[in-house]
Image (cartoon, helix red, strand yellow):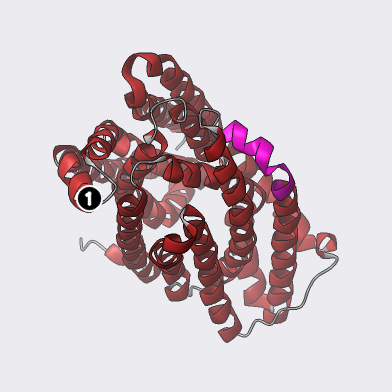
């Protein structure tokens, strides 16, 4: 029997994989530029800490709902009436941007208090920087709200090129801020570049949306439409589960701020490298096989489990291989790609140590994305949320208990323990719930 690869890897997925790879390459360039310019310093610690609250608010209030509901709803409407679909798009855009404008105003007012929560261990001057950058980065959340609304429409229309290019432009904005603005404005120049990158992210998607025939009309009473009411109902489970990873690294950033200067930077750089194989193997393959999982579920539980086992085996082998290679080359990766300039040998060693332990979680995190989608295929969105919360509690608790003994190594080690329990729990629960189904 000939293997039909197109069933598992649609053409759109290939476009997204290529643009995702391009985005990661630009991300590596971004990290190298930042490392050379600022090193593992309180400046970069402040920049990364300032990201947390705007990113968290955006993901909870906007991104979760759009990811859960907008794409299928828009696609359904678009097949019946383009006009009705674009009206829904305008309601979605008005709701998303309006919500984030209100949130940004609140964030601007309380930024000083929030900076003390995300990084309590930073000194007074660093807290001032966190506060200033948090207020600037609140603007990027508004732009991302619009961009995600455009993105939902483009995905529903199977237009992936501009959608996939947008993260590349975002990283270019950050790099431009570091190279062009930082010499005059310091680390604040990077924050300004981040907002410009978010604008480019939104602009390229908006252009493609306009090209598809959409035209903007503000929807002042968006909450009255049946589609938006359905969107709000569907987003609630995702609102609970979506921010768990953000909370995890919010907690880790808070703990890292209590360690040596540069610990937050080392944590973020190491996580960026660890996320590359997770995204390219775990997330990409899980996303590609998800439609097949949904089809298999309609046939029999046995076929669903068989497909899941085959895919899990491939992900496990590839992710373990990637983890071993990354662990063996951890020091060389950090030294070559980040070392030099203000990023000295001590910073390289600290980041390489953190990355080495993060490698443990590459297979477990990759598999967790697949197992979560297996539950989604059975129309169960609650169980993945439950185990995500359990994983968060274990990750945070173990990191806190181990930090006094092993320092920054406690953070990636705690993440691995939480990821392992989450993945094992999802797998065991899936086998249990499908054991008696035919």
Does the image show residue 316?
yes
Q: Where is residue 305 in the image (x, y as percent from the top left)?
A: 37, 40
The magenta span reads 107-118
How many numbered callouts? Answer: 1
Q: Residue at x 33, y 62 (%)?
A: 26
Q: Residue at x 67, y 80 (%)?
A: 82
Does the image show residue 373?
no
Q: Position of residue 360 (x, y in %)?
A: 27, 32
Q: In which quarter of the image is residue 217?
A: bottom right
Q: Position of residue 124 (x, y in %)?
A: 56, 34
Identify which residue, 40 or 14, lies in the foreground: 40
In the picture, measured across the screen, residue 355 lies left or right of residue 298, that is left
Identify which residue, 344 or 290, lies in the foreground: 344
Q: Position of residue 376 (x, y in %)?
A: 51, 45
In the picture, measured across the screen, residue 69 lies left or right of residue 415, that is right
Is the C terminus in the top left, top right, bottom left or bottom right quadrant? Answer: top left
Q: Residue at x 49, y 40 (%)?
A: 375
- Secondary structure predominantly adopted by residues drawn in magenta: helix
Up the image or down, 210 lies above or below 282; here it is: below
Give the residue pinned by disc 1: 340
Up the image or down, 312 lies above or below 31; here it is: above
Up the image or down, 314 lies above or below 85; here it is: above
Q: In which quarter of the image is residue 172?
A: bottom left
């Amino acid at each position: 029997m000939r293997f039909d690869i197109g069933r598992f890897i649609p053409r759109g997925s290939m476009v997204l994989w290529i643009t995702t790879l391009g985005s990661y390459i630009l991300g590596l360039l971004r990290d190298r530029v930042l490392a050379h310019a600022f090193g593992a310093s309180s400046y970069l610690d402040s920049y990364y800490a300032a990201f947390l609250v705007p990113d968290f608010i955006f993901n909870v209030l906007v991104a979760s709902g759009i990811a859960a509901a907008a794409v299928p709803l828009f696609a359904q409407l678009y097949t019946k009436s383009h006009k009705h679909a674009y009206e829904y798009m305008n309601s979605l855009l008005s709701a998303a941007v309006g919500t984030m404008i209100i949130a940004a105003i609140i964030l601007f007012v309380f930024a000083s208090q929030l900076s003390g929560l995300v990084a309590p261990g930073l000194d007074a001057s660093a807290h001032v920087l966190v506060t200033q950058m948090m207020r600037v980065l609140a603007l990027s959340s508004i732009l991302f709200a619009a961009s995600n609304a455009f993105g939902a429409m483009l995905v529903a229309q199977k237009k992936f090129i501009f959608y996939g290019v947008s993260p590349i432009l975002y990283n270019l904005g950050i790099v431009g801020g570091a190279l062009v603005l930082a010499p005059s404005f310091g680390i604040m120049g990077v924050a300004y570049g981040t907002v410009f990158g978010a604008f480019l992210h939104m602009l390229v998607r908006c252009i493609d949306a306009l090209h598809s025939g959409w035209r903007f009309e503000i929807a002042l009473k968006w909450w009255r439409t049946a589609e938006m009411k359905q969107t709000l109902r569907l987003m609630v489970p995702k609102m609970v589960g979506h921010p768990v990873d953000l909370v995890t690294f919010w907690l880790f950033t808070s703990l890292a701020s209590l360690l040596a200067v540069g610990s937050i930077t080392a944590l973020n750089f190491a996580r960026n490298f660890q996320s590359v194989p997770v995204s390219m193997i775990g997330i990409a393959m899980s996303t590609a096989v998800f439609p097949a999982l949904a089809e298999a579920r309609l046939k029999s539980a046995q076929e669903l489990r068989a497909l899941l086992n085959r895919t899990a085996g491939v992900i496990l082998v590839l992710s373990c291989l990637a983890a071993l290679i990354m662990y063996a080359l951890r020091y060389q990766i950090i030294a070559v790609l980040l070392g030099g300039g203000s990023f000295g040998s001590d910073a390289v060693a600290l980041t390489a140590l953190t990355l080495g332990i993060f490698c443990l979680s590459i297979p477990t995190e990759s598999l967790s994305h697949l197992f979560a989608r297996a539950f989604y295929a059975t129309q169960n969105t609650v169980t993945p949320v439950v185990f995500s919360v359990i994983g968060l509690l274990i990750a945070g608790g173990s990191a806190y208990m181990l930090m006094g003994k092993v320092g920054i190594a406690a953070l990636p080690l705690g993440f691995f323990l939480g990821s392992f329990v989450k993945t094992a729990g999802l797998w065991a629960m899936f086998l249990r719930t499908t054991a008696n189904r035919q």
